[in-house]
Every structure is written in structure tokens, then in C-alpha cells.
Amino acid sequence: MKYSDRINILTREIPMGGRNLTSTEQKRIRAAGYPCGRWFVDRVYASPNHGTLYKPCRTGGMDHAGIYVETI
């Protein structure tokens, strides 16, 4: 599994509270070599075009996936 990568997959901006990835974005992250289930993206700093990905944790909550994403 890869960590601390930067991928240009986002098709739209990230709102303040974050959002789930769209199906198009999930296809792009799968094509980049990451197993994809339900991913959540949250903003980095105040930029709506840069974020970090989180995935559901087995014990509840969210785990940081180590992937930084940007809008295309």
C-alpha cells in the first residue's frame, strides 16, 4: 500500500465539512492502485482544492489514508 502520495483526482471543490468521493473520483483512485471502498475527503488548510483522504476504521471513526488529493 502506498502512503503520502499526491493524486489529482478531484472533480469538484471540497466544502468546509468535507465530502464523500464521487464515483468518478473513486474510479480514478482505483486506477492509481488503491483499493477503494468508501472514502471521505476533508480540506487541507482553507483551500477548497486540496484535501486528505480518510477511510472508515474497523473500530469506528475514520483513519487517515495518507493520500493527499487535488482538483484536476
Image: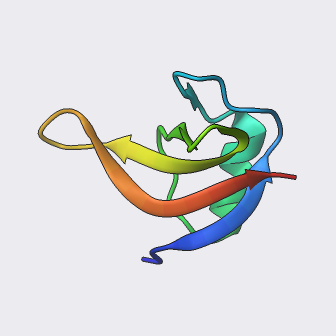
When the figure is inspected, residue 44 is found, relative to residue 67, above or below; the finding is above
Query: Which quadrant of the rendered structure holds the N terminus?
Result: bottom left
Q: Residue at x 70, y 65 (%)?
A: 7
Left or right of 18? Residue 12 is right
Q: Is residue 16 left or right of residue 62?
A: right
Within the image, what quadrant is residue 19 found in? top right
Where does residue 50 sit, x and y in percent of width and height? 68, 49
Question: Which is nearer the eye, 34 or 17?
Answer: 17
List x then y, in percent, for residue 35. Answer: 50, 60
Compared with residue 26, is residue 22 higher up or lower down, i.e. above or below? above
Q: Position of residue 60 (x, y in %)?
A: 17, 33
Which residue is the extreme one toward the front? Answer: 46
x, y percentage for residue 55? 39, 45
How are the residues colored? rainbow
- Left or right: where does residue 15 sit relative to residue 1? right
Q: Is residue 22 above or below residue 65?
A: above
Residue at image location 23% in from the left, 33% down from the top: 61
